[in-house]
Amino acid sequence: MSKLSKNIEINRQSWEDRTAVHLKSKFYDLEAFKKNPMSLKSFELEGLGEVKGKSLLHLQCHFGQDSLSWAKKDAKVTAVDFSPSAIEAAKKLSEELDIEAEFIESNVLMLDLKQEFDVVFMSYGTLGWLPDLKQWGAVVAKHLKQGGTFFIAEFHPVLDILDEKTQFGYFFDENTPTIKEVGSYTDGGEDMTTEYCWWNHSLSEIFVALESNGLKLQSFAEFDYSPYYIKGTVERQEGQYVLENRAKQSLPYVFTLKATKK
């Protein structure tokens, strides 16, 4: 097994461990979601827009809350994740809520559904798990119809270089080391230690990966807060989280990007 394949397998196992914790966490608040199946934030709702009647492929869907939220808005959803436990949980949630969506277990970089979609969607904390963005861009392009839309809402890569514990660089490093972490980014899991590998990607790398695979940038925006609580942040106003030790500084926390297949 190559070092890259080994690191991807380490990450898959990390998400197997995390999923069990996340399903019980207040962060994801599964019971509240079951009562009101809508987990999408304003960034993606306003940025992507109307999806009714459109086929939508959700990459790195975890256990499906965002996938089912799009399905609730009448998109025809297919969702993919490499964690068997997450896919199993997503299927059960879909059945329990009687919201139709198809969930598929697959490594995104190896994905070939032999189907094209109106929309390919990703959100929050996804790109850093991918070691090859050119291959990722090819997968996105392969699964988009001509004129179809790719949309991502993602944490800004600058955030990772501000993390004093991990101290990632801004630019991609194929030799990035594996990291051991107690718990997860959610509550819970205090007795759990996971190992994972994270590859930071600059904005230019993201743009090139899409453009070189035939996608044309339609819009790009950066935002000075996170819609989610991240460790070390405080809520400056409802639903807007900023780093406590840099609360007076204007920093990019999230970006959204929309592109169209030419």
Image (spheres, helix red, strand yellow):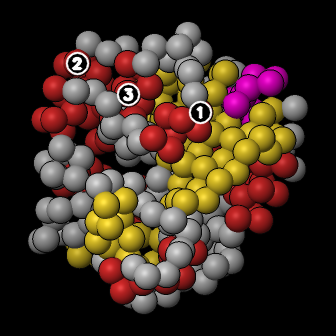
Q: Earlier in the sequence, mark 1 or mark 2?
A: 1
Element carrying mark 1: helix
Circle 2 or circle 3, nearest the eye: 3
Q: Is residue 143 magenta?
A: yes
Residue at 18% over, 69% down = 192
Residues in magenta, as a range: 140-149
Residue 48 is tagged as 1
Q: Can you tell which quarter of the image residue 95 is in?
A: top left
What residue do we see at 19% from left, 19% from top? Answer: 96
Identified by mark 3, the residue type is Ser
| Residue sitting at x 12%, y 71% | 191
Q: Is the residue 146 above or below the residue 237 in the image?
A: above
Residue 137 part of the magenta-drawn span: no
**In this rendering, position of residue 92 left or right of residue 148:** left
Percent of width and height locating residue 260:
78, 34
Per the image, label 2 sits on a secondary structure element best described as: helix
The amino acid marked with disc number 2 is Leu
C-alpha gap between disc 2 and disc 3: 11 Å
Quarter occupied by the C terminus? top right
Q: Residue at x 22, y 27 (%)?
A: 36
Quadrant including the N terminus: bottom right
Amino acid type, callout 1: Leu
Residue 69's label in the rendered image is 3
Rendering coords of residue 67 (x, y %)? 42, 30
Number of callouts in the render?
A: 3
Pointer 2: what residue?
A: 97
Q: Main secondary structure of the magenta part?
A: strand
